[in-house]
Amino acid sequence: MSKSALARAPSPRVAQKQARARNSIIEAADELTRKRSVDDVSIKDITETADVGQGTFYIHFKSKNDVLIPIMQADAARLDRAMQAALKDTDDPAVILATSARIMGRYVTQDERWRWVLRNSSVPVDEMQRAFGKFRDRDYQKGQASGDFTELDPSISASFTFGGFINVLVANLDSSAREAAIDQATELALRALGVSSEKTTHIANQPLPSIQLD
């Protein structure tokens, strides 16, 4: 490390203090947005609950939307753990991907904070990618490794099908047929990956397992 980099790097004590402040901000924003609409929570509300100054907030986050990112990433990881537990005895990559997509779609279109993200983000696909991308890529790679999915660039396949799926969620947020739209989008995504139409119709409409969030 260069001398200039060493001069810019905070001491361990300062770094720990900054990490505590950042965590306090995230925890405060998490607590407040669970109880109230995101629109009704201000940065001042967050900093007062976290017991930090607004200047400290802007050291770590550019905006209120920005502080939601680690919160939603943690929630996505929590949902993924629950889905993985529910699917631990399932080996078929297409079933795993379809079931995960259908559960995730239902969860994010029912949860008020996720609905806010989908409704208010200028690029909802990017926001969902930040939260669910690594889990999605893992399941796509399993399908390609097993030969169940088309031999195409996994990043392109994932971006194409995931982007279409998220756009369906946004378009059907307030639809009375929302769950049917989620299932149909799942079926179309699987067909785009090369899974047979007969199989996709079956697995995109079979009963979903119950999940237990931690």
Image: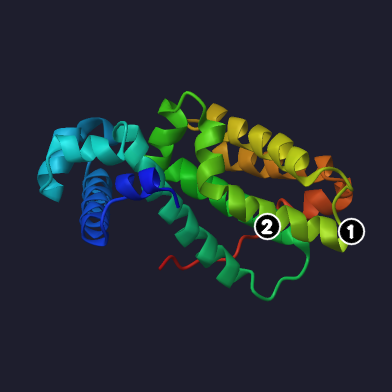
The answer to whether 174 is drawn above or below residue 183 in the figure is above
**Residue at label 2?**
138
Which residue is at the front of the view, 175 or 69?
Answer: 69
State the image coordinates of residue 135 (x, y, percent, origin top left): 61, 55
Which residue is at the front of the view, 207 or 5?
Answer: 5
**Residue at label 1?**
147
The answer to whether 25 is drawn above or below residue 100 in the figure is above
Residue at horizontal 30%, vertical 31%?
A: 63
State the image coordinates of residue 201 (x, y, percent, origin top left): 79, 49
10 Å crowding of disc 1: few (<14), some (14-19), many (20+): few
10 Å crowding of disc 2: few (<14), some (14-19), many (20+): few
Q: For this view, does 136 lie left or right of residue 127?
A: right
Residue at horizontal 32%, vertical 41%?
A: 67
Q: Between disc 2 and disc 1, whose residue precedes?
A: 2
Residue 125 appears in the figure: yes
Residue furthest front in the image = 3
Q: For this view, does 93 lie left or right of residue 125?
A: right
* Scheme of image coloration: rainbow
State the image coordinates of residue 130 (x, y, percent, origin top left): 52, 43
The answer to whether 184 is drawn above or below residue 51 in the figure is above
